[in-house]
Image (spheres, rainbow, N blue to C red):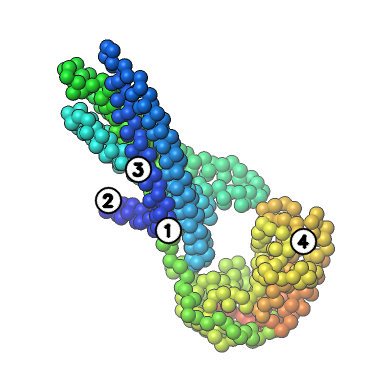
Amino acid sequence: MKKQKNAKAKGSIKLVLKFMRPYYPLIALALLFSVIQIAATLYAPVIIGDAIDYIIGTDNVNLEQVMKRAYILMGLIAAVMVFQWLASLCTNKAAMNTVRDMRCAAFNKLNRVPLSVIDTRAHGDLLSRVVNDTDLISDGLIQGFTQLFSGIVTVVGTIVFMVSLNVSVTLVVVLITPVSICVAYLIARATHNMFKTQQNKRGELSGLTEEALSGIKVVKAFNREEIAQKEFDEVDEELRKVGTKAMFYSALTNPGTRFVNAIVYAAVAVVGALMVIRSPSGAFTVGMLSCFLSYAHQYTKPFNEITGVVTELQTASAAAARVKELLEEKEEPADDGLPALEYCDGSIEIEHADFSYVPSRPLIKDLNLSVLPGKRVAIVGPTGCGKTTLINLLMRFYDVQSGRILISDTPVTDITRSSLRGAYGMVLQDSWIFRGTVAENIAYGKPDATREEIENAAKRAHIHSFIEKLEKGYDTVIDDEGSSISQGEKQLLCIARIMLTQPPMLILDEATSNIDTRTEQKIQSAFAAMMKGRTSFVIAHRLSTIADADLILVMRDGNVIEQGTHAELLGRGGFYAELYNSQFV
């Protein structure tokens, strides 16, 4: 178990280092500037000690030497300020660029993973990994690394300066401070699991919040506000508990090390004062004691800073592990080397196809289907029979476990997904609008479309007159969450997208479900014109809308149990006839 944790931690660090690699020069500059800043900081106590020695003792005030040290000290302070600013600038730039690249990689990964990964994960949790966890990596692992480096250089540099002044007092400092390291180590080891659990709970809470907000109307419609609040409170309380424990134990680090540091400071003061008293020859002066007290403080300060950043490092490590898990998700098989679909006559062949979302629950079993070019195919059946799954297989959102699917006599696995999906135009029951202008939304599938083409598509979708009434017409900015347009109008915009692209095949999944009867009649006539000469798959629950289909597939339990025209199926008096008659009883 311990080996697995160490392996995960190492893997997380390797991930961050991989994304930091292009910015190593910036990190190197930051480290160089830090070294210069630390050297100037450590040299300052020597100058101050010398100045003190020039004003100690009877008739021993040398104002000229004191002023000379004062000017040097001013120069050192200025150097510290400048190089500290430069180091921070380089560190922040490297951190922000690294996080940007990591976010891009995470978002790109979401575009390349199988749809099953998206369908089986809480969207809020995925969002948290892409946005929040990458921020924590920046705050912890990247910037924490530079703080760690600065701390180590400060400790080493301080020891060198102290040894050059007096070995005995240096030993007093060095022999006591390891206690501070032990305290920090023991506490940090205990908090790692808590911070990992905390990050998982944050992702769970984000997923729950996103789910509640996206379905807020349903929550209110069923008076589930109190239950939703209770579920949120439970997860939030679990997050509070684990967060409190993590922060409590990590908060012990700083006071614990500060207590040890106070002991170091007191020991140096006592030993140093005794050495001043017992060194009448001036081997150990008051100025040197002042210098050592400053060094004792500077030597222990990095331990406080390093242990203070332990909390961020633990959180960042857990966040990096979550991002790493996302980036290591198995991707869809690459289309490299596969040709694009060059010719599509609209014919579809499905041969002995088997598919299931869960291996223990088969859905589609030994499905065989042949669709001739230009035919209008309607797919009907009860909920869960496999209608939408069949569409997912046609579009290769999922692949069959056995059997094969051919388009224009070409297996879909032998062509690129992009060319396959480009052959379809799809309008789903759930409309989707992105934030942008109306024109941009219609031209989503054809970004180079002219305004005339966009308007003609809108007219064919019977949405042009509505768009013209908007404040800025086709330049009006809309989004999916806004209330400026209705659900039916959103769906008309989605239909206009297909009217614009004019693909060789169509998939309509209850495409007119959110449109009133009068508009539906207009849309149906527009669809009829658009479907002419194109292979079309129509999923419909209102069977009256597909009465003129060339072929109706009746599905149940993942199998096509009946197929034929509307009249033929009614004449057989089978399952389709039962479904059709049940809608008019």
Residue at x-position 48% and y-position 60%:
105
For disc 1, the neighbor class at 10 Å (few under 14, some 14 to 19, many from 20) is few
Is 443 placed above or below 2 here?
A: below
Judging depth in this view, the residue of 559 and 284 nearest the camera is 284
Three-letter amino acid code of the residue under disc 4: Tyr
Q: Which residue is mark 2?
A: 2
Seen in the image, is 78 located left or right of residue 492?
left
For disc 4, the neighbor class at 10 Å (few under 14, some 14 to 19, many from 20) is many
Judging depth in this view, the residue of 278 and 55 nearest the camera is 55
Is 346 placed above or below 397 here?
A: below
Q: Secondary structure at mark 3?
A: helix
Estimate the spatial distance between the alpha carbons at disc 2 and disc 4, rounded to whole Å: 60 Å
Seen in the image, is 119 located left or right of residue 542?
left
Three-letter amino acid code of the residue under disc 2: Lys
Whether residues under marks 1 and 2 lie with C-beta atoms below 8 angstroms apart, the answer is no
Q: Which residue is mark 3?
A: 35
Three-letter amino acid code of the residue under disc 3: Val
Q: From the top left corner, tell me how far across and down residue 119 is, in percent.
A: 52, 62
